[in-house]
Amino acid sequence: MSLKITFSIKKRQLIVEKIIPGASSEKVIMQATSGGWDGYKHLPKGNWVITENPSGFRSYFGLFLVDNNINDQFLHDGKWRDGIRFGYHDDTGSHGCIMAKPSPGQSYIDGKHLWAKIQKMIRTESSKKLLTYTNNQNPNKSDSTQYKLTSYGFLVVTD
């Protein structure tokens, strides 16, 4: 059994699929957004490690770009970015975080229940590992502290 988690930039869609070999898969689909606030761009395409939220707010996850140094910082189009999260709200954008939101005609509460289902799938159905990292890439925010977080597999950002 495994989880396949994908966010499509163009479709503004999050798909979480539980794959069970030899059986039918379970799929949860939600609308989602990334970027748009204060001139922030959406996340770059690629693989992202899903982690506990480094900021501590449990209903969000952290997202770390899989690059040369997996941590809470990355260089995107010549600018340093950090603090990318994966959560739920009903607004129209974010500072780059992937935010699931209610579909048109769906209530905020119904969307929140669907997000709770996704959270449970990620926390209980994914392969958990302990991730040790330092935020030492960005020269303006370098921190040599070693942090440890639980990681929950990967999210793939497409088109």
Image (cartoon, grey):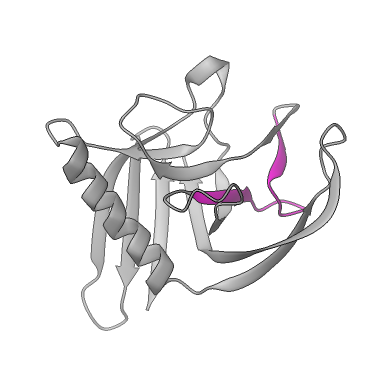
Which image quadrant for residue 147? bottom right
Q: In the rendering, at what x and y percent does residue 97 appear?
A: 50, 37
Q: Residue at left 19%, top 42%?
A: 109
Q: Residue furthest left?
A: 105
Magenta span contains residue 95: no
Q: Residue furthest top?
A: 38
Q: In the rendering, at what x and y percent does residue 46 appear?
A: 57, 47
Which image quadrant for residue 91? top left
Magenta region = 61-76
Q: Residue at left 47%, top 45%?
A: 86
Q: In the rendering, at what x and y percent does residue 154 appear?
A: 52, 60
Whether residue 88 can be seen here: yes
Whether residue 159 can be seen here: no
Residue 39 to residue 77: above or below: above
Magenta span contains residue 73: yes
Q: Residue furthest bottom?
A: 22
Image position of 85 (left or right of 102)? right
